Amino acid sequence: MVASSVLGFPRIGAKRELKKATESYWAGKITSEELFEIGSKIRTENWKLQKDAGVDIIASNDFSFYDQVLDLSLLFNVIPDRYTKYGLSPIDTLFAMGRGLQKPADEAKGIKAIDVTALEMVKWFDSNYHYVRPTFSHSTEFKLNGSKPVDEFLEAKKLGVETRPVLLGPISYLFLGKADKDSLDLDPISLLEKLLPVYIEVLNKLKEAGAKSVQLDEPVLVFDLPQNVQDAYQGAYEKLAKGVAGLDIVLTTYFGDVRPNLKAIANLPVSGFHFDFTRCPEQFDEVVAILKDSQKLSVGIVDGRNVWKNKFGASLKLIQSAVDKVGSDRVIVATSSSLLHTPVDLDNETSLSEEIKGFFSFAKQKLSEVVTLSAKINGSTDAAITKALEENAAYVEARNTSKIINNPEVQKRVAAIDSNMGKRQNAFPARWNKQKAIFKFPLFPTTTIGSFPQTKEIRINRNKFQRGKISAEEYEKFINEEIERVIRFQEEIDLDVLVHGEPERNDMTAYFGEQINGYAFTTNGWVQSYGSRYVRPPVIVGDLSRPKPMSVKESVYAQSITTKHVKGMLTGPITMLRWSFPRDDLDQKTQAYQLSLVLRDEVNDLEAAGIKIIQVDEPALREGLPLRAGAERNAYYDWAAESFRISTSGVADETQIHSHFCYSDLDPNHIKALDADVVSIEYSKKDDPSYISEFKDYPNHVGLGLFDIHSPRIPSKEEFIEKMGKILETYDAAKFWVNPDCGLKTRGWEETKLSLSHMVEAAKYFRGKYAK
Ligand SMILES: CN1c2c(nc(N)[nH]c2=O)NC[C@@H]1CNc1ccc(C(=O)N[C@@H](CCC(=O)N[C@@H](CCC(=O)N[C@@H](CCC(=O)O)C(=O)O)C(=O)O)C(=O)O)cc1
Ligand SMILES: N[C@@H](CCS)C(=O)O
Ligand SMILES: [Zn+2]
């Protein structure tokens, strides 16, 4: 009999209970006990849901109050000294590491001031989830610091659910980390020998608690791994297997192709392997060939990264091949990855058309998919299973013939794209000569990335407008007042290039997706992006076109009330694609080109409406990069850059194009290929000084982000001066823009006011210094 398995379930709660609870805790409105209670309720519901659906292998320890990688850092005592000196509780230490902490002293209570920045947060592989990077130093002392995996295993057991605890495996944990600023010569993988005993200790504790098997995620196996990392696998897993004899270890990979690293894992003493066959079905024969007689094969076949219904016919064929090769008792039918990256429950969607709803499957529905597929392979003649299979066949047919997918006009326009559409009239030096005469920027021009605080009031008014409680006129008036407030504030603190603040946008992707034909959007399809911040990715269901301008009204209004230049603000084609759920019936390049034409029209309309600076954000540019080097990656470099250039090259030389990138280690050549006039890049958390020099030869203008917008912490003017001074040691002052790391939508006004004022004061300090 094949078994069914789910590698992890979304932990945010069907009604975003986790967000509400964590934010209430941070605001001091609930206690830690109340927070833990809500966490426990969410876990209970998730396990129950999976058990009731009939899933055989259910994960535990997939829950987290912030991030599962950060949980491990806390568990293994990978806590830089700067977080331990305040005597914080474990949960407060976790949050301080995740989002920084700044608290004034309370002399009456004898409490000292706290001021600590957050650890770096980066993309989780090629997804829009972000993890907190483990940060190691020579003084890191691994030791077991807590019992979260064991506690959650026992919690499920008490509820009558036998789970398979999941932990990120030791090599992935180290490889995804980095050396702290005081230990830059440290290669994290060199810490493996010291780390393994702690893994063994926690795994033994799980075994003692009754766990029969564990899921060790080693997703870095889908990267091009350095030889020393590949070589580390055999010894590490031999030690683990020996140290925890009797506990089955299933080594899990996802999001790609493991074949180039197959030698590294071919002889591991594990009880089974999980591979992602939704991403890379081509690896099937080669990966199955490494299995030893008793090892299990977990077949990742229900997509954990998208919302499309599984196509049962094709999946059953692949699972059957697995059964034919290794026998049904050794096959597990599984989700391709954790379901963390999918919305929770399609049943909560009430606004989607029945036709489109019929195409989708969210986390809860995917449980049934896994169960149905395994039941069918097990020969079930159950009426419910037969009905599910028939309905699925009808779905495949309905989608193939659906009228909402094809738009011949869009297809014609994409086919007519020629290479001139991706070229500005002249190269940057000629453009800059014209632009500087118009803009007359001072040295170190200051700007922001676009969004200003999305206050509760903004969200409530948007919500009222969506529910018809206020009219379009009232809403527009409210938005205009917000824009005016943001403009006046920027004038007051003397920023050079202003923004309108994006108050009309729920999200930088969803806002545009909701205005583009060919997109569908959900009302409850939340997915965790990081910590307590979630997104509701719109879904590309058909060919994409723009019925009317999307952002011109707000930009024109903002420009009309100030004499300073206001940037028009758009989300680029690659980011629109990556932060949406893309179609699975059309290649991503064509979807990106469709989006690039939509954006080209918008950029041209902004220019025609008198907007002279237009920023087209591409924070997801790096995220879209195929995880391995090779032909696919090279092709991506070309079509991603071309899509951006198609969007931005319809304007005159005098129009200044900005772009912005965050959350990734960027490749300067890829950024260069976009040919934007000015780029702003997240930088404030890059401890490695060599990152400064990576961009020093960028031919156009650059702003390295000077403060972390994820943290409520306010940097002082002196801190800005120090940071800018360091950058200026290697950087050309004439090309240096001054800006934060990213948009300020998650920040409060008080922090925003102070941080930006200090930033502008620091820019002025350097202007004075350079004028001498
Ligand atoms: C820049 N980033 C983004 C990423 N991906 C995106 N799609 N968008 C991004 O901006 N990836 C990388 C980074 C980091 N990620 C994020 C992600 C999310 C946020 C964020 O602030 N999220 C908000 C939700 C945003 C949103 O869509 N809000 C809606 C709905 C608001 C709501 O909850 N309404 C209430 C009613 C109103 C009330 O009473 O408050 C309700 O429905 O119950 C909106 O504004 O209309 C979040 O809060 O999680 C930031 C960075
Ligand atoms: N313009 C957007 C970019 C975020 S990556 C913002 O400021 O929020
Ligand atoms: Zn950003």
Image (cartoon, helix red, strand yellow):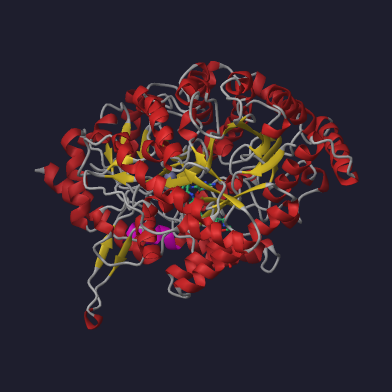
| Residue 601 lies in the magenta stretch | no
Left or right of residue 244: residue 383: right
Q: Residue furthest bottom?
A: 108
Nearest the eye: 285 or 443: 285
Up-down relation of residue 8 to residue 656 (above or below): below
Span colored in magenta: 485-492
Left or right of residue 433: residue 529: right
Q: Quadrant of residue 733?
A: top left
Q: Quadrant of residue 285?
A: top right
Nearest the eye: 296 or 174: 296
Left or right of residue 49: residue 173: left
Residue 169, percent across and down? 45, 40
How many numbered dots are placed on residues in this image? 0
Up-down relation of residue 187 to residue 725 (above or below): above
Residue 161, percent across and down? 65, 57
Note whether residue 637 is visible.
no
**Which quadrant is the C terminus positioned in?**
top left
Residue 570, percent across and down? 51, 42
Residue 190, percent across and down? 29, 34
**Which quadrant is the N terminus positioned in?**
top right
**Magenta stretch, overall SS:** helix
Nearest the eye: 214 or 470: 214
Up-down relation of residue 321 to residue 730 (above or below): above
Note whether residue 85 is visible.
yes
Nearest the eye: 563 or 262: 262
